Each structure stands twice: as C-alpha cells, then as structure tokens.
Image: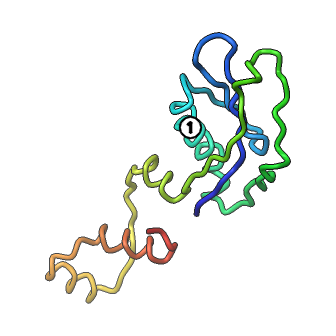
Amino acid sequence: MKLIYPAIFYKDKEGEGYSIIFPDIHTGATCGDNVSDGYYMAEDFLGCSLYDDYIDGKELPKATKFEDVTIEDDGFSDMDLSFKTMVDIDMDDYIRRTSSKTVKKTVTIPSYLNEMAKASDINFSKVLTEGLKKELNIK
C-alpha cells in the first residue's frame, strides 16, 4: 500500500541540517544532515511511525491536504530555506526491507500431502511463504 503525507522541512539556522515534522503524525519528528538525507530519514520515520497500525489493520491517520499545511516560525529555523513537501512510502516494501526475520511455525497437513511433497523435494517454508503472500496480496 502506497501512502503519502505532507512534511515540513525546517532548515537549521546554523549548519546544513533540517528538522522534519509530519503534521499528521504525532509520535515525534526526525532530522537530516541535508535535504537528501532528510528525505531518506523522513521516509524511514513515516514507515516506522505507521508500522504497528498498518500491521494490525488499524485506521491510519488521514493526510492533510498539501495546500492546508502551513509552515509556522518556530524561532529556531531559517524560514527562508524551510519548505513543505510530500513524502511517500510503500508500506509493503518498507515491511519487506525492515522485517525480514523468519519464525518457525508448526502446521498440520494431511499425511498424504506431506509424503508427496517430501518425495518431490518441495520446500514447505517456501510454499507456505508464497501462499501467504498471495493470500495477503503482498508482492
């Protein structure tokens, strides 16, 4: 699932860094050493912030319309170099990249399928993983 949220990049008055906030995500903020690093960190923050609710199937925060986002002077930033933008993330891809840990599962199947699969050298873990991905519409 692809998601997109507005973000505000506040330019540090001293140095090259940016502080980045998402008006719709209230779990914190992130920062980057420069604009490029800021985008990378913003995407990671977004994925991390939405991860649990996404996995649990909970409703995610609604994204504010871009034109409704205002950059407020925080007193610490260079307002001339601060800007708003949209940051997107593919949650399915984010989960694949960050959660590749495997777990052992015990399953019950008919004995004839077990014997036929073993005789055909079928990898049970691979078949179960592919089947679950198909069932969950994960590419």
Amino acid type, mark 1: Tyr
The one of 81 and 48 positioned closer to us in this rendering: 81
- Residue 66, image x, y percentages: 77, 49
Q: Quadrant of the C terminus?
A: bottom left
Q: Residue at x 49, y 77 (%)?
A: 135
The one of 55 and 116 positioned closer to us in this rendering: 55
Q: Residue at x 39, y 66 (%)?
A: 106
Quarter of the image for residue 84 reads: top right
Q: Residue at x 71, y 28 (%)?
A: 82
In the rendered image, the vertical position of residue 96 relative to residue 73, given as above or below:
below
The residue positioned farthest toward the top in the image shown: 14
- Residue 21, image x, y percentages: 72, 34
Q: Which residue is mark 1?
A: 39
Helix, strand or loop at disc 1? helix
Tell me the colour scheme of the image. rainbow
In the rendered image, the vertical position of residue 6 relative to residue 82, given as above or below:
below
- Residue 28, image x, y percentages: 71, 32
